[in-house]
C-alpha cells in the first residue's frame, strides 16, 4: 500500500459536513440522544427568521403604492441586518458557523476549500435565518403587491447579502485571530478601528446635516426627515459597501449591470482577502498558540494583608480580575475598541433631529449602549479565565465573593466608560445635581445588569475565548448564536427590572428640583443594590450546586 | 539507539526525510530556534530531545509548514513545505503537543474525517478508523464524543488521526504523556514496526528513558541550538563520557548543569 495520499483531491464536501455537524450538534456532552438541543436551536432560529419575515412583509405591503419606499426597506434592511450580524458576532464571540480552522492546518487542505466550506456552513447556519426571513418577506410582499420584479430583486439580494456578509465576517475573524500574536499590532488595530468608527459617525453626521440643508448650529428635523436626509447621502454609497450592496442594484434598467458588477467584485475581493488571511494564519503557528494564559493565583500578600480592605472577601478577586482584564492583550484590545462607544454616544447626541438629545436618552438610552459594550465580558464572566478557574473553584472562598469580585472589576470598567458621556452632558449644561442623579442611576442599572449576568454565567457557562482567539473545540456554532441572543435578553431584562426607577426619573425629571431628583436617584440605587444582592445570593447558591458542571464545561480540557 | 532496539533501523534509508539548513525563528526579541542545521534520514526513529522551551515544538511547526521560519530553509522529502504545502502535508502525519481534535466529534467520526481529509475514500477511511480504534484500545469508546475522553484517550485518537493515511514521516510532539503503560507498550511496538517498514518518526520529548529506548539517533536541543547529535555511542565519544553513560548523563553534559539549587531551599527545610 502506498504511503501518504494525493494532495490534490478536493475535500470540500468533507469540510462542509464537519462544519454543519459542529454548528448544529448540541452542546451537551456524552449524549447522542440529546438532539432535542439541536431541534430547540432550529426552532429558535426559525422564530427569529419568522419575525424578520413578518416585519419586512408588513413594511413592503404597507408601502404597496410607494415603490421607492419598498426599495428603501430592502436596502436599509440589508444594512441593518449586517449591523445585527456584527453585533451578534461581537457579543457571542463569533457568528454561528465558525469553527476553529487552525485545527485543519496540518491537513492537506487548500485555503480555497477551507474558505468555501466555512462560507457554505455559515450560510446554512442559524445566524442566517434573520436574513433569510427578511429578504423572503420582501419577496413575498413584492409578489403580493403585484411587483414580481421586486420579488426577484429581493431573492437575488438575499443570495448576494448572505455571501458578502459571511465573507466579511470571516475576514474579520481571520484578521482578529492574528492579533493575539502581537500586542502592539492588536492595540494599534483597535485604535485605528476606533478612530475610523468615530470618524465615520462624524462624517455621516456632517453629511446628513449638509444634505438636509441645515445650518452648522443644527436644525431639529423630524425622524423621517432625518432618515430621508441620511438616505440621500448613504444610498449612493450603498453599492460600495459589503452587505448593503446586495440590495443596491434594485434600481432596475442598465444601472443594474455596473452595480451587479460591483457586488460581484466585492465578493471576489472578500474571498481573496479571506484566502490570504487564512494562508497567513496557517503559517503563523496558530495551532498551538490558541492556548490561553493560565489564571493568576491570588496574590498571597494581598490574601494575607492586614489592611481592612484586604479582609473584604471579594477584594482579591476584584484585584485579580481587574489585572486579568487589563493585562490580557486581547481583552485590552477589546476594551480599547469599546472606548469608541461613548464617543459614538457623544456624536449621535449632536445629530440634527435631536432624537438622542431627549430626556429618555440621557436617562437610560445611553446606558443601553454601555451595557451592550460590557456584555461581552459580563454574561459569560466565568469563562474569561478558563483553566485558572480551577484554582478559584478549588479555593475555600464563599462563591458570592468570587462573583462579587468579578462584578466589581466589571463595574470599574463600566465607570471608565461612563466618564465620557457624562463629561459631555455636563459640558452641554446638565446641572451637577442631575448629572449626579444620572451617575447613580447608571450604577444601579449596572449592578442589576451584573446580577442578572451572573445568573447566565452560572447557568450557561460556555468555554469561549474572546473574539478572535481560537474557538474552543467543544462549542458548537449554534450555542454561540444562542449565547448572543441570551446576552441581548439579559440587557432587555435589566431595562425591564429597572422600569420603575427609569419611569420615576422621567416622570419627576422636571417637577421636584435637583435635590429631589438626587433623592429619587438614591432611592433607585437602594432598589438596584437590593435587587443585585438578591440576584448575587441566588447566583452564588446556584454556583455551589452547579460547581462540578461549571468545572466540566470550562476547566476540563481547556 | 546503537545498543538497541530496532534491528533493521536505518538500513532501509533511501534518502533524506527532513533537512534543516541554518533554520532560525525569532518571536520579537526572543530567538526560539537559532541556526539549526540537521538532517533526518528516511527510516530513522529520530529523537529530538530538549528541556521545556528549547525550541522543539517550534521546529516541528516549521517542518510541518505551520510556522514560517525567520530565515534558513527546510526540505521534507526534498520539498519546501511553504511552496508545496499540499504535497508535504499529504506525506506526513502530525501529533501536535496541543492536540488538534474537534472534540464534539466521536472518536470514530474524528478518525474517518481525518482519513477523508487525507484523500481516502469513505469506505477505506471508515475501515481504517475501525482498525485504528481497535489498535489503540478505543473500540468501545469509538461512539463517544472526544470531549468525554481522558487525556490519554485523546492522545490515542490524535495518533490515530495522524497515521490513518500511512504517512512516510510522522512528527510526534510529546506524544506519550498521559497514556497508560499498557497502551504505551502497544503503541511503541507499532511505531517500531512502522520504522522497520521504512517510515520515519521524528519524536520530540524530554523523557530521556523513552528516547533512549526507542530512538536510533538523537539531537539534543537547548535554547534553540543543537548541542549534540548522533547515536548514543557517538555522543558519548564526542563528549568524552564513559561507555556506560546514560542519555541523561549525555544530556546534562551537553546542555550544562541541571536546574535547581538554593533558590527554594525553604521547600525542604
Image (cartoon, coloured by chain):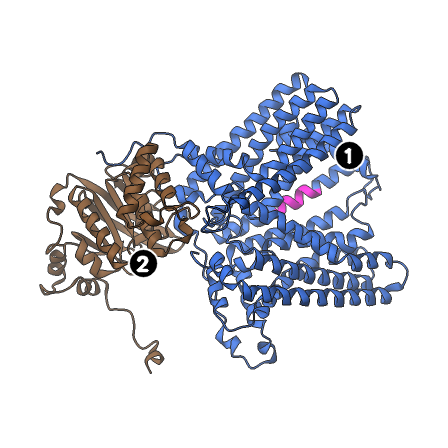
Residue to which mark 1 is pinned: A229
Question: Label 1 crowding class (10 Å Cα cut-off): few <14, some 14-19, many 20+?
Answer: some
Question: Which residue is most to the right?
Answer: A511
Measured in 3D between alpha carbons, the distance from the residue under mark 2 to the one under mark 1, in whole angstroms, is 66 Å
Q: How many marks do you count on the picture? A: 2
Question: Which residue is most to the top?
Answer: A254
Please indicate, yes or no, whether residue B72 appears anywhere in the rendered image.
no
Magenta stretch prevailing secondary structure: helix
Left or right of A412, for residue B260: left
Left or right of A43, for residue A146: right
Measured from the top left, where is residue B192 in percent x and y?
18, 49
Instruction: State the quadrant of the N terminus of chain A.
Output: top left
Q: Which mark is residue A269?
A: none
Residue A98 higher or lower than A544, as above or below: above
The verdict on residue B216 being magenta is no
Write down the region rendered in magenta. A194-202
The residue under the point 72% across, 20% down is A147
The residue under the point 62% across, 52% down is A338
Tags 2 and 1 touching, CB below 8 Å: no
What color was chain A assigned in the picture?
blue
| Figure chain in brown | B
The residue under the point 53% across, 75% down is A302
Q: Chain of mark 2?
A: B
Q: Which mark is residue B178?
A: 2
Measured from the top left, where is residue B213 in percent x and y?
17, 57
Tag 2, which secondary structure?
loop
Question: Which residue is most to the left?
Answer: B243
Amino acid at each position: 500500500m502506498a504511503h501518504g495520499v494525493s494532495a490534490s483531491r478536493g475535500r470540500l464536501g468533507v469540510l462542509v459536513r464537519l462544519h454543519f455537524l459542529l454548528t448544529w450538534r448540541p452542546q451537551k456532552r456524552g449524549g447522542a440522544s440529546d438532539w432535542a438541543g439541536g431541534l430547540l436551536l432550529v426552532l429558535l432560529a426559525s422564530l427569529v427568521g419568522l419575525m424578520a419575515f413578518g416585519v419586512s412583509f408588513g413594511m413592503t405591503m404597507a408601502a404597496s403604492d410607494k415603490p421607492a419606499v419598498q426599495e428603501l426597506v430592502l436596502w436599509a434592511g440589508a444594512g441593518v441586518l449586517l449591523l445585527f450580524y456584527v453585533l451578534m458576532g461581537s457579543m457571542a464571540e463569533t457568528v454561528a458557523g465558525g469553527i476553529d480552522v487552525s485545527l485543519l492546518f496540518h491537513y492537506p487542505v487548500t485555503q480555497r476549500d477551507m474558505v468555501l466550506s466555512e462560507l457554505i456552513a455559515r450560510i446554512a447556519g442559524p445566524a442566517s435565518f434573520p436574513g433569510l426571513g427578511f429578504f423572503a418577506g420582501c419577496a413575498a410582499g413584492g409578489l403580493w403587491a403585484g411587483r414580481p420584479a421586486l420579488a426577484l430583486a429581493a431573492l437575488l439580494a438575499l443570495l448576494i447579502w448572505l455571501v458578502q456578509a459571511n465573507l466579511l465576517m470571516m475576514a474579520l475573524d481571520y484578521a482578529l485571530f492574528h492579533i493575539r500574536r502581537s500586542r502592539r499590532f492588536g492595540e494599534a488595530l483597535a485604535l485605528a478601528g476606533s478612530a475610523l468608527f468615530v470618524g465615520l459617525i462624524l462624517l455621516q453626521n456632517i453629511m446628513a446635516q449638509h444634505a438636509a440643508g441645515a445650518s452648522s448650529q443644527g436644525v431639529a428635523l423630524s425622524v423621517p426627515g432625518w432618515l430621508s436626509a441620511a438616505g440621500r447621502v448613504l444610498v449612493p454609497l450603498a453599492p460600495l459597501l459589503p452587505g448593503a450592496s446586495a440590495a443596491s442594484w434594485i434600481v432596475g434598467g442598465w444601472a443594474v449591470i455596473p452595480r451587479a458588477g460591483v457586488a460581484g467584485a466585492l465578493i471576489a475581493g472578500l474571498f481573496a482577502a479571506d484566502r490570504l488571511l487564512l494562508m497567513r494564519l496557517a503559517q503563523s503557528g496558530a495551532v498551538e498558540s490558541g492556548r490561553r494564559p493560565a489564571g493568576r493565583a491570588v496574590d498571597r500578600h494581598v490574601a494575607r494583608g492586614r489592611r481592612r480592605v484586604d479582609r473584604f472577601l471579594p477584594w482579591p478577586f476584584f484585584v485579580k480580575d481587574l489585572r486579568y482584564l487589563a493585562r490580557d492583550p486581547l481583552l485590552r484590545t477589546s476594551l480599547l475598541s469599546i472606548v469608541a462607544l461613548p464617543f459614538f454616544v457623544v456624536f449621535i447626541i449632536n445629530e440634527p433631529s435631536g432624537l438622542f438629545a431627549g430626556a429618555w436618552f440621557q436617562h437610560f438610552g445611553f446606558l443601553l449602549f454601555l451595557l451592550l459594550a460590557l456584555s461581552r465580558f459580563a454574561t459569560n464572566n466565568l469563562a474569561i479565565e478558563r483553566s485558572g478557574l480551577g484554582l478559584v473553584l478549588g479555593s475555600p472562598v464563599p462563591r458570592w465573593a468570587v462573583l462579587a469580585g468579578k462584578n466589581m472589576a466589571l463595574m470599574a470598567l463600566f465607570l471608565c466608560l461612563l466618564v465620557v458621556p457624562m463629561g459631555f452632558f455636563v459640558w452641554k449644561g446638565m446641572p451637577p445635581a442631575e448629572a449626579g442623579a444620572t451617575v447613580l442611576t447608571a450604577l444601579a442599572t449596572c449592578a442589576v445588569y451584573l446580577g442578572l449576568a451572573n445568573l447566565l454565567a452560572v447557568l450557561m457557562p460556555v468555554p469561549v475565548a474572546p473574539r478572535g482567539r481560537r474557538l474552543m473545540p467543544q462549542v458548537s456554532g449554534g450555542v454561540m448564536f444562542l449565547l448572543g441572543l441570551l446576552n441581548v435578553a439579559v440587557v432587555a431584562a435589566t431595562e425591564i427590572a429597572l422600569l420603575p426607577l427609569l419611569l420615576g426619573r422621567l416622570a419627576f425629571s422636571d417637577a421636584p428640583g435637583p435635590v429631589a431628583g438626587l433623592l429619587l436617584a438614591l432611592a433607585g440605587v437602594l432598589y438596584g443594590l437590593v435587587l443585585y444582592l438578591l440576584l448575587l445570593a441566588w447566583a452564588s447558591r446556584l454556583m455551589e450546586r452547579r460547581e462540578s458542571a461549571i468545572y466540566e464545561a470550562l476547566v476540563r480540557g481547556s | 539507539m546503537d545498543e538497541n532496539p530496532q534491528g533493521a533501523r536505518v538500513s532501509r534509508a533511501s534518502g533524506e526525510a527532513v533537512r534543516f539548513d541554518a533554520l532560525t525563528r525569532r518571536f520579537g526579541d526572543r530567538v526560539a530556534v537559532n541556526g539549526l542545521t540537521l538532517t533526518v534520514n528516511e527510516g530513522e526513529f529520530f529523537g529530538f530531545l530538549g528541556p521545556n522551551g528549547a525550541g522543539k515544538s517550534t521546529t516541528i511547526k516549521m517542518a510541518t509548514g505551520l510556522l514560517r521560519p525567520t530565515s534558513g530553509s527546510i526540505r521534507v522529502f526534498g520539498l519546501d513545505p511553504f511552496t508545496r504545502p499540499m504535497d508535504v502535508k499529504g506525506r506526513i502525519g502530525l501529533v501536535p503537543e496541543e492536540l488538534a481534535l474537534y472534540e464534539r466529534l466521536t472518536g470514530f467520526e474524528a478518525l474517518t474525517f481525518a482519513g477523508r481529509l487525507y484523500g481516502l475514500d469513505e469506505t477505506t477511511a471508515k475501515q481504517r478508523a475501525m482498525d485504528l480504534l481497535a489498535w489503540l484500545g478505543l473500540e468501545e469508546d469509538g461512539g463517544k464524543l472526544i470531549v468525554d475522553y481522558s487525556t490519554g484517550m485523546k492522545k490515542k485518537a490524535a495518533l490515530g488521526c495522524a497515521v490513518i493515511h500511512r504517512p512516510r514521516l510522522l512528527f510526534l510532539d510529546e506524544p506519550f504523556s498521559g497514556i497508560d503503560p499498557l497502551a504505551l507498550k502497544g503503541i511503541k511496538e507499532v511505531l517500531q514496526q512502522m520504522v522497520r517498514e521504512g517510515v520515519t518518526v521524528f519524536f520530540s520529548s524530554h523523557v530521556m528513558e523513552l528516547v533512549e529506548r526507542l530512538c536510533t539517533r538523537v539531537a539534543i536541543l537547548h535554547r534553540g541550538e543543537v548541542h549534540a547529535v548522533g547515536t548514543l555511542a557517538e555522543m558519548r565519544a564526542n563528549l568524552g563520557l564513559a561507555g556506560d553513560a546514560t542519555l541523561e548523563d549525555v544530556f546534562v553534559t551537553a546542555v550544562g548543569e541541571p536546574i535547581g539549587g538554593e533558590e527554594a531551599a525553604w521547600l525542604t527545610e
